[in-house]
Amino acid sequence: MNRALRLIRRRLIASIPVLAIVVLGTFFLLEAAPGDAVDAYAASLGGDAGLNADLRAQWGLDQSIWARLGAYLYALAHLDLGRSVIFSRPNLEVILERLPNTLLLMGSATALSFGLGSLLGIWAGAKPGSLRDRVLSVGSLALYAVPGFWLGLVLIVIFSVQLRWLPLSGIETIASGKQGLARAGDIAVHLILPVGALGLIYLALYLRMMRAGMTEAWRTDYVLAGRARGIPRQRIVLRHVARNALTPLVTMLGVQSAAMLGGSVVIESVFSIPGLGRLAQEAVAGRDTPLLLGIILISAVVVILINLIVDLAYALLDPRVGASEGQS
Amino acid sequence: MTLLRTPTALLGFAILFALALVALLAPLLFPADPLSIAGPALLRPFQDASLPLGTDRLGRDVLAELVHGARTSLLVGLAAAATSIIIGSVVGTLAGFLGGILDEVLMRVTDAFQTVPGFLLALAFVSVVGPSLPVVVFAIALGAWTGPARVARAEVLSIRERDYVAGARAIGMHPLKIAFREVLPNALPPVLALSSVIVAAAVLTEAALSFLGLGDPNRITWGGMIAEGRTILRFAPYLSIIPGIALVLTVLGVYLAGEGVVEASAARKVRA
């Protein structure tokens, strides 16, 4: 897989300046924030002017902005994102602890919107212009207009409050003592509503893209030739039309990953899921700017990695991608 | 009027027209302070003709709050979209027209802004600077200008090779003057085609920010109403559901109207 390795290397090199800009951006946002880490520390634990000055000298906060930028970059290079004020622990540790929950939520929601969206898109695109096509198009657009957090609340009212079928909030039953499969099942039940709220909204994107791709594929010569040869309609729809419309959808997965991550912030807060988004909200409430900016940095890294994986998958699906780049 | 021929586009424009009317006339329709007590607390909707949508936890008129909230939603949505289109087209024009190292730098900055989740960026910006209407507008624009920038740049790249640009260069016009007087206006149509999507996203982002308590505290917002209703979701779900329906209708109206415009201009191109 030389092609894949080249692709990975090229993508990683391209992401260096992007990440550098994000780092600079977070640093200057941190500088713009009123008060510094010592103020936040003193506000939560108390302190006097002498102690504060000592702390500032110790943390290097009394130096020039360039010296502080240097120290910030030096720390980052050693994977040190600073200490969280509200948790009194290293930021990176707190963030990495919460990341799996967010990835689980994002991944499941993406699977739902991609899977259901492309299936419905195939169904709609099999007969462009039909009644079901128009109903699905407008219906999915209406779903796309729904704010995720509100859909979450509506689902809670219906399934948790009225019907009492599903748990209200959290990622698992607290202190249930469940292990292994029982615990996985418990988490799955807790995730049904949040994944539904996040996934259903982005369903429209995949549905519409699939449908548009299929409408286009119907007009191509090879589909016409297939129909002329008398290939059954269902076979044409699945083998020739849908298959060609599916590949561009994969690139959408990467493009949407940043939006999905942003969307999960609010969904996690609605369902009290201890993930990255909920952590961001806690950082905002606790005025913990270093933690908040650490979250932004890590989420940028996550988005870059997801895009890398998506690109690799795309290269596997479409042999033309990256094939001619050996010389350049 | 090709624009009004499709029923869905017509519906979209009808929704937007009604909303704009309600938002503009809010001070006339409900002259009293929407945050003042209008009746008994937690009156259900459709019980009292003078308070058609009922009252909230403190006895405030839900309909009056809703109408005043429409002003914030529309104002923030339109202002944030305008800001991101202006930033995006200026950045895209500079990058595309001047090229070279500046193009490279500006496009990497665009990449960086696209890599950070826009909502997290808005959240961080509002929390650092403090919530007020202009800050919320700018925070939303921070995550939304990259789309217009890319489209503007692509358009400028094709326009800068045209004869009239070469002519402007020949008569010794300043490059920046050519970029913003001659090229940018011609590159705008495809950028403006993005506006409905951007307005819709801005309305949703504003709602999410105020739902998390980061909206302008001096204004009524639909997101804020949903958050308030959430605390008593079990007993009075209508308090959260009603402003959400208003949000859905607004965003749907923007989408449908936008699609209508795109379809109508496509039809015009086919006929021409």
Image: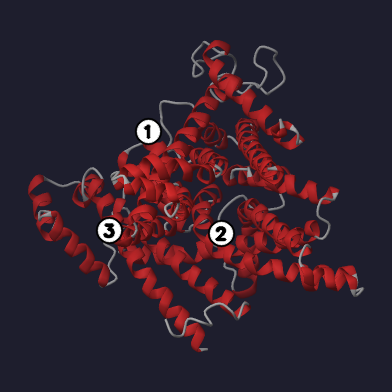
Q: Is residue A169 left or right of residue A225?
A: left
- The residue carrying mark 3 is A24
Residue for point 26% across, 47% down: A44
Instruction: Inspect this view and state whether residue A282 appears.
Output: no
Q: Residue furthest left?
A: A50
- The residue carrying mark 2 is A171
Where residue B70 appears, x then y in whole percent? 55, 26
Say above or below: B111 vs B194: below
Say above or below: B244 vs A120: above
**Screen quadrant of the N terminus of chain B:** top right
Task: Name the residue nearer the viewer: B136 or A81.
Answer: B136
Residue for point 53% across, 22% down: B68
In what element is the residue under mark 3? Answer: helix
To which chain does the residue with label 1 belong? B
Badge 3 or badge 2: first in the primary sequence: 3
Q: Tell me if mark 2 has few (under 14), some (14-19) or many (20+) residues whose alpha carbon lies within 10 angstroms of its own.
A: many
Please say which color scheme the image uses.
secondary structure
